[in-house]
Amino acid sequence: MTDMVTLTIDDQEVTVPAGTTILKAAASVGIEIPVVCYHPYLTANGLCRVCSVDAGRRLQAAACVTPVGQGMVVHTQTKDVRRARRTILEMLASTVDLSEAPHLQDLILAYDADPERFEAFERRETPVYDDNPFYIRDYNKCINCWRCVQVCAEDAQYTFALNFDGRGFHTTIGTFMDDGMLDTTCVFCGQCVGVCPTNALKPKRQAMLEEGYDPDEIFRQTRRGGRKKRALVGE
């Protein structure tokens, strides 16, 4: 028999199975906690902390990975919680290009975040990889949410074509020895593109349409193997 846990979230009493995360417990009673790195079909890692809530502890808890506890009292929209989310969004906007991340743009508006608050900070600048006929890799838009790495690995595909490259602030997603995608274990299933929340991974045909290419030219280029790697930034 499954043990049940009763807690309070935003003044609502909630009873859920032990081990349930705060995020899922809140969703069970219609309370929406914002997420960015979290994806319902991938392993939660609590990376971005946009889902952090006040669970009565010294530090805010990442709702996507924190299990509920008996008698826990959770607040999801306190002044401090909203300020923390706003600051995280502002720091993301100062570091990477969020212009093609509609969910993040909605959150910036919802939390009255100022994308230019930290405009003097260093921005992440990397080459744009155009090295295969299926998708573009523009890591200037990447927020390091891990989704593409996870879906390419144990969470779905077991291909392991993508992984982390670099350290600290300069950590990006990359390939082994920085090989082009055609020289990796990638099978071009498209799952990494499907889970990317910022368009850092974009279908090649969509990218070429946006660049103004004629549909016939797009067909020719994507059919015969794609253009060579090009660096729009950083080379």
Image (cartoon, rainbow, N blue to C red):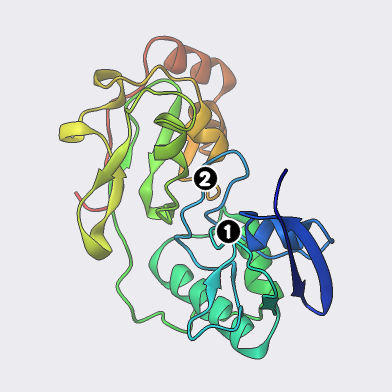
How busy is the neighbourhood of tag 1: few (under 14 within 10 Å), some, or many (20 plus)? many
Q: Given the image, on which type of amino acid does mark 2 rest? A: Asn
Q: Which mark is residue 199?
A: 2
Residue drawn at x 33%, y 28% is 160
Q: Given the image, on which type of amino acid does mark 1 rest? A: Cys
Which quarter of the picture shows residue 112?
bottom right
Residue placed most toward the observer, 101 or 221? 101
In what element is the residue under mark 2? loop
Measured from the top left, where is residue 30 in percent x and y?
84, 61
Asked whether, in this view, residue 54 is left or right of residue 47, the answer is right
Asked whether, in this view, residue 215 is left or right of residue 91, the answer is right
Measured from the top left, where is residue 86 in percent x and y?
57, 79
Residue placed most toward the observer, 57 or 41? 57
Residue drawn at x 44%, y 74% is 91
Measured from the top left, where is residue 13 in percent x and y?
83, 71
Q: Which mark is residue 64?
A: 1
28 lies above or below 95 = above
Judge whether residue 213 can be spotted in this image. no
Q: Residue furthest left?
A: 177
Judge whether residue 151 can be spotted in this image. yes
